[in-house]
């Protein structure tokens, strides 16, 4: 796996492996262009490292970006889409300045049915890896 300049895979205090910045990234910078394999839903065998692109397309990350951990207060976001030729692309973009040595994170935004416990440690941690917009529905389900 070729190295992505500015990133390094490490053992993470959040979960398993993670990715740290080896140089400064400014808010709005493309931290990494993701290398991956485009898959249709029925082709997915293991979705642990897949990005959801749309209801039928996923992008299985095959570079260091696959080890970027979730955080409820992330420093990055994923931009992904399909170009005019039907090819999926994805990139990791800094939401704020990132210092060298800081772990790179993004919000996985899982659905209710795929939510799992979160260990990000953010002050506003939702307790589950779940889309922030679904927190009210989760609370309502727990109250009922």
Image (cartoon, rainbow, N blue to C red):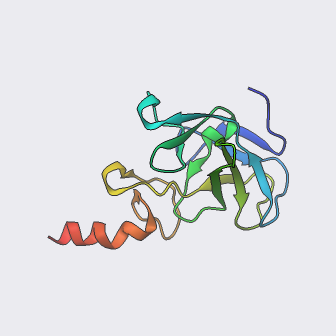
Drawn side of residue 46 relative to residue 92, left or right: left
**Residue 69 horizontal/vertical position (percent):** 57, 48
Whether residue 67 sits left or right of residue 140 in the image: it is: right
- x 78%, y 67%: residue: 27
Q: Name the spot of residue 62 as percent of width and height, x first.
A: 64, 31
Q: Viewed as shown, does residue 13 lie left or right of 142?
A: right
Residue at the left extreme of this rendering = 144
Quarter where residue 46 is shown: top left
- Residue placed at 21% from the left, 67% from the top? 141
Q: In which quarter of the image is residue 16?
A: top right
Q: Which residue extends farthest front?
A: 85
Q: Which is nearer the eye, 15 or 61? A: 61
Q: Which residue is drawn at the image coordinates 79% and 33% (left, top)?
A: 3
Residue at 63%, 55% (x, y): give it.
78
Q: Quadrant of the C terminus?
A: bottom left
Image quadrant in which the N terminus is located: top right
Number of disc labels: 0
Q: Where is residue 51 in the image (x, y as percent from the top left)?
A: 55, 45
For the residue pair 8 and 35, the one nearer the viewer reads as: 35
């Amino acid at each position: 796996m070729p190295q992505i300049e500015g990133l390094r895979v490490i053992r993470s205090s959040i979960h398993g492996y993670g990715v740290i910045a080896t140089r400064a990234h400014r808010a709005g910078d493309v931290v990494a262009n993701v290398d991956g394999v485009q898959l249709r839903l029925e082709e997915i065998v293991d979705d642990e490292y897949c990005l959801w692109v749309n209801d039928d397309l996923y992008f299985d990350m095959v570079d260091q970006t696959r080890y970027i951990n979730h955080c409820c207060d992330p420093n990055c976001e994923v931009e992904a889409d399909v170009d005019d030729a039907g090819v999926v692309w994805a990139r990791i973009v800094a939401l704020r300045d990132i210092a060298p040595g800081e772990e790179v994170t993004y919000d996985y935004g899982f659905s209710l049915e795929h939510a799992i416990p979160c260990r990000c440690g953010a002050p506003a941690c939702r307790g589950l890896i779940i889309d922030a917009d679904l927190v009210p529905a989760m609370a309502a389900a727990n109250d009922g």
